[in-house]
Image (cartoon, rainbow, N blue to C red):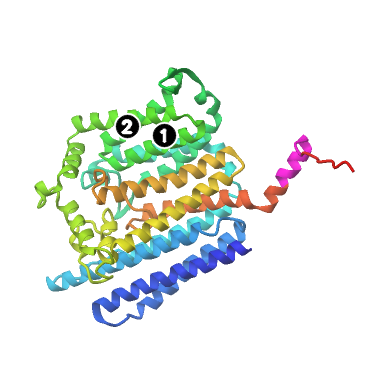
Amino acid sequence: MNRRRTELVLLAFAIVVAMAASAAVDLARKNTVDASVLGYGAALAALFGTAHLAVRLLAPAADPVLLPCAALLNGLGLVIQRRLDLAAADRATQLGNPAPSGHAGQQLLWTLVGVVLFGLLLLLVRDHKVLDRYRYTLVAIGLVLLLLPSVLPARFSEVNGAKIWIRVAGFSLQPSEVAKICLIVFFASYFVAKRELLSLATRRIGGLNLPRARDLGPVLLAWAASLGVLVREKDLGSSLLFFGIFVVMLYVATERTSWLLIGLGLFGAGAVAAYNLFGHVRSRVDIWLDPFQDASNRGYQLTQGLFGLATGGLTGTGLGNGRPETVPYAGTDFVFASIGEELGLVGVVAVLTVFALFVARGIRVALGCRDDFGKLLATGLAFSVALQVFVVVGGVTRLIPLTGITLPFLSYGGSSLVANYVVVALLLRISDADRSPVARATDVDDAELTGELTQVVVMR
């Protein structure tokens, strides 16, 4: 039970950091700490305390670091949303308009939904290998969710030119977040079943063992599907994310560098074709290459984000002392720029370190898992978070073109937050199966039945 005590201490630390950050916002704005900070801390303690109890009861041997990392990022994200809400309220007061409702309360509600779903998944999925039985059901659900926005009328699916939403009666859902998890489960199951076939090589060129031509089908289908998402939904981020996850999981399953290089080649070809054929892709690339050429129009968001990061410097302006609200979509696509402005390079590095720790623990879960399906599933889940962070941070810092996806746990958005808590729950379930004494005892019993134990006899 030492793991659970470690988890509880780390969760307490995450809550204290979030409360201190919220208090810093109040001190910067009005030199006093609002009583709501205590309510905020109590709400976080109740939510993450409940999550901890669920892990303690349902997955007692699971990794003790994953949940605290998620809690720390989620808590900081709530502080950033509250800080932006206060800025929006101040702006509305100056203009004589009523204050907007804000996002922090809604994000806290979505955190509750995510924690509830987190607990339900741990309760209902007692063995991750059960998911292997439903691979075709899950891939069907994933593909339907992924493609559904593209066939809906624009008024139900389009936001800022991208058709990635389902909006009905004031309620909005980004189905690609759920589809991502369904497809990762399918990829893990499919690659385990077909690994020997996909690992076959028929020729060796330039030191690489190339696969058979007929085995290129899965990669070509994934490539075509990612281009279809890009064309139909104008969603560059999801297209890159899904294809990247597919190629990496295929490489891990087969250990063939040729698959990785083929995937990179197809990605490059698709990128060039998309740039030449689709205006929205060309516009994103042109803004990336020179955002200051049209800084007051198309490049405004990116240039403002870069100015915010530059203003933050090494230690930042301090929470509540910056102007992150001047960046369009500061709480969603550009939440990283908001953090960089007020917490500086130190804060940015700290946030990226927490993400790196989360991904590293996820990879550790994959390395420790004793079944191939669990290994691939944990790898896909951990890498999906890593790739999503890279895509978002790379876009904000102008390393790659902007894609418009959310930063896990930090950005405002219910679909993303809830889906990421599902990712945490699955990683904890796989981790518990690996570390559980009962599971280890079962493995020993199986080895005894099959004669796999080696007996050492000492001659005297």
Q: If the image is split into quadrants, where does the N terminus sit?
A: bottom right
Q: Are marks 2 and 1 in contact (CB under 8 Å)?
A: yes
Hey, what amino acid is under mark 2?
Phe
Q: Which residue is mark 1?
A: 247
Residue 31: quadrant of the picture: bottom left
Assess disc 2: are there few (<14), some (14-19) or many (≥20) residues with their C-alpha within 10 Å of its C-alpha. Answer: some
Place of residue 205 in the rendered image (x, y in percent of width and height, measured from the top left): 41, 19
Magenta stretch in the rendered image? 442-453
Place of residue 87 in the rendered image (x, y in percent of width and height, measured from the top left): 22, 69
Q: Which residue is mark 2?
A: 267
Is residue 409 shown above or below 191? below
Residue displayed at 24% across by 80% down: 30
Residue 435 part of the magenta segment: no
Name the side, left or right, on which 136 lies relative to 371.
Answer: left
Name the side, left or right, on which 218 lies relative to 126.
Answer: left
Residue 448 part of the magenta segment: yes
Does residue 381 show up?
yes
Magenta span: predominant SS is helix
Does residue 148 show up?
no
Assess disc 1: are there few (<14), some (14-19) or many (≥20) residues with their C-alpha within 10 Å of its C-alpha. Answer: many
Hey, what amino acid is under mark 1?
Val
